[in-house]
Amino acid sequence: MTLKTVLLGTCSAMMLAGFSVAGASAETLTIATVNNGDMVRMQGLTSEFTKANPDIQVNWVTLEENVLRERVTTDIAANGGQYDIVTVGNYEVPIWAKQKWLLPLDGLGDKYDMDDLLPAIRGGLTVDGKLYAAPFYGESAMIMYRKDLFEKAGLKMPESPTWEFIGDAARKITDRKTGVNGICLRGKAGWGENMAFISALNNSFGGRWFDEKWKPQFDQPEWKQSLTFYASLMKDAGPSGASSNGFNENLTLFQQGKCGMWIDATVAASFVSDPKNSTVADKVGYAIFPTKEGVANHGNWLWSWNLAVPASSKKAASAQKFISWATSKEYTQLVASKQGWANVPPGTRTSLYKTEDYQKAAAFAAPTLAAMQAADITKPTVKPVPYTGGQFVTIPEFQALGTTIGQLFSAVIAGQSSVDDALAAAQATATRDMTRGGYIK
Amino acid sequence: MATQNTKTLARVMMAPSVILLLIWMIVPLAMTLYYSFQNYNLLTPMNVSFAGFFNYQYFYTDPAFFQSIWNTLVLVLGVLAITVIGGIAIALLIDQPIFGQGIVRILVISPFFVMPPVAALIWKNMIMHPGYGVLADLAQFFGAQPIDWFAQYPLLSVIIIVAWQWLPFATLILLTALQSLDGEQKEAAEMDGANAVQRFIHLTLPHLSRAITVVILIQTIFLLGVYAEILVTTNGGPGYASTNLTFLIYRTARLGYDVGGGAAGGIIAVVLANIVAFFLMRAVGKNLDK
Amino acid sequence: MARKVTTGARIGWTIAAWVVALLIFFPILYALITSFKTEQEAIAGFSLIPSGTFENYITVEEQRDYFTPFMNSVILSVGSTILALIVALPAAWAMAFAPTKRTKDILMWMLSTKMMPSVAVLLPIFIIFRNLGLLDTRIGLTVMLMLINLPIVVWMLYTYFREIPGEILEAARMDGAGIWQEIVYVLAPMGVPGIASTLLLNVILAWNEAFWTIQLTTTNAAPLTAFIASFSSPQGLFWAKLSAASTMAIAPILILGWFSQKQLVRGLTFGAVK
């Protein structure tokens, strides 16, 4: 009986306490955000904002990326009105802005200096000339490689490497005995995992997702070339279990010195060069995203995490105030003064890359900027396309389609499916989804 | 005596549960049915229109559809087999006079206390990971090539994780039934010279039949809905190797924002689940009357 | 126990049982150990001896408020289970002791209400919650979890009640006991262990519910499942931190299970009580 009595007692006491909590009186912003390092850092510094704005309080909802996306999309689409600020990717911003789900950010203040935002990033967040989300940090993709291993193998990273060179170098560096893999690439199924890389890879091979009439292009030679290249490279020079490696897994492998090269988001540079977590911190070199011989396309990978105000928020003014603070130059200074320049959120403002302290503290600053400037998501492919987006396609259907095709391609490097079968299945499923979406008439 | 009275009373007592569950069933079901006949993508709310049976046709023609049904069945049956057989074995083991019975029992049921996403993460990162997992370390210790579980045996991996989560539930229920087995009956059987196997088949197993039925029925309901573990570990791949029906619905409704398609998938899932339940009831339902 | 067992056999069974138990417990144990490792140790290969750092717990606690989601978990799981018991007890009693031809059908139908995949009904439920103003409220989620687990509670209670021999009730009735007295003096004492273990099992089920508790909450009502969702897969493999957060999410319910051992055991063995 004791258990029951105790439970009953505590329960009723807690219910009384729990249900009678009243709302606070100051204006409280509810902010939904992802749980990556830069965002967590921002939460830690929020007190600086609330100190300066005592009439505003901040409530955080921090979730893992996929859960956050689901959660926020439901809320916004069903007009739940629970959030005043949401963290959204540059994939969602144009789609949501078109639905009038986001408020244009016109109250960021005079000091904000919008022209300082990197043009590529800003362009991706602007619809009909209005900015709908403020970039918190941005990334492109580049090669991170081990200078020591390259030297040992007698290799030199060219200014603008080709995939042919990368393929040879990766195979040369691979040493299964010491556990060094020539190259680590994403293999885990998902539109934001392996498909991000594979889409960029395919761009740099001169391929595209759809032609001007939205006809899927998986039956074209470019896809066959890029996927064959990727699959055989992973087989010859990739780590074991590559088909379940995403960004996180590869980051750890690289930090432990198990990868000769890693081609991934530029934001990773600050992690692999951080001596606290990386055993190879002082041996990392950077180079621009490769291209196929004779193709002038570096993948056009461009991603940013941004802050936006849902149209359903009733506290838009305060919300913009916060956004203005969190994405300002002053915030950058604040992080730099408290936690050092290497921890500053990268990839949003030109001024950051002109700061000498930053260039000194971050060896990856210049290559990151070069990668970001090379990326153009409005014209991501060699051949014309009806969509925008580099490592993704900015249509609502892409998440599901990208994940399905990601599964098919992940089966290829798991050795369970051939390149031809996977491409045929991808073509069929993409045609089906595009027909349903009304793109193919 | 007072049977009419009792019957009325019984009805009154059942009423709250039945009414609540009726509402809980009908309202979402009706709304889902309604949506299943609409063209409705969450991200293009302006283009809602009547779709007829197109959503059903679309869902049913998904290249992953039949494999997902097959995977669902394999998943449910696989987990049921492991948990029922394992549960009986463990229940018999714990029922023996052993030292530290209390601690053993709590250790065995502890997986049940772990939230499904956490369980999946622990297994994925620390146990089955081909680079850092305990199983990989073990394989290397014996000089073998580590198994890449989620690439080579995706569905089996999911089955193992889910079975680990549900084994305690089965063990708990079966242990209950086992311990209610009359000690005198056991002794009588021993006196008759029946050996352990005979005693198990003729005495213990029949006695456990209702508990086994309950385990199967309740678990089946939960297992038909498994998707969080898949999402965390394999994302339904490689290919469609670990896509079950619920994950397919998840992909349609949540990743594709396709409310209509997801609703149609939900209705299909309910119909299929009811078919499964129907056969299940015919197969094992009579045990409940004992 | 009247069975004669040799010490040798007993030791043999003990070893077998402990090996099995430890194997089953191992993943949890390993997560617990990992939570006391540094991040480098966590991926450095198999080791059962951590360096014993508390850093992960401190970091987790610094990053995220633990107390509010913890309290929410307690309120939601215990509240919903008790609500479910109140509704289910009479129903289970009626089905067990006054069964009709349709009892089995009703039971089966109750289970079938759980067959609709949650992902398919998310949007309807979300809209209902929004219209009723229940989003991110404890009361909304408590009722929700109650409805989700109600069929299971009815089933478990029904199964336990069925174990109580009908003859005892008949005897009580012969003695002139009314239905109320029958429940209070005969059934309740015999049913308590069954009720206790139903209670415990459903607290656990509600505690672990990780779909609705995340989808329908933001901050006020978010329980530990949401707490965990903010630690899984950020940039980098923070396994030690994730382990620490997981341990914090599992520990309360594990400890509850540990302390309710006796009740659980009684719940498990009451069938043998004559």
Image (cartoon, grey):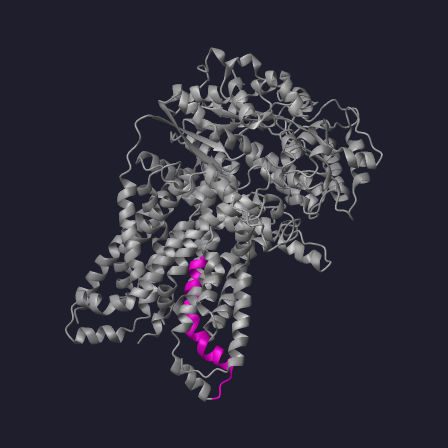
| Residue A274 appears in the rendering | yes
Quadrant in which residue A427 is drawn: top right
In the depicted structure, whether residue B88 falls above or below residue A19: below
Q: Is residue A34 magenta?
A: no
Which image quadrant: the C terminus of chain A?
A: top right
Residue C206, position as x, y percentages in the image: 39, 50
Q: Residue furthest right?
A: A154
**Closer to us: A120 or B278:** A120
Count of labels shown?
A: 0
Q: Is residue B196 magenta?
A: yes
Q: Most prominent secondary structure in the magenta stretch?
A: helix
Give the side of residue A291 with respect to residue A51, left or right. Answer: right
| Residue B56 appears in the rendering | no
Residue B226, position as x, y percentages in the image: 49, 50
Q: Residue furthest top?
A: A110
Q: Residue furthest left?
A: C176
**Closer to us: C11 or C73:** C11
In the depicted structure, whether residue A6 falls above or below residue C123: below
Give the side of residue A410 with respect to residue A150, left or right. Answer: left
Residue C154, position as x, y percentages in the image: 33, 58
Quadrant in which residue C219 is drawn: top left
Residue B176, position as x, y percentages in the image: 40, 68
**Closer to us: A427 or A334:** A334
Instruction: Specify the segment rendered in magenta.
Output: B193-220
Which image quadrant: the N terminus of chain A?
A: bottom left
Give the side of residue C139 with respect to residue A357, left or right. Answer: left
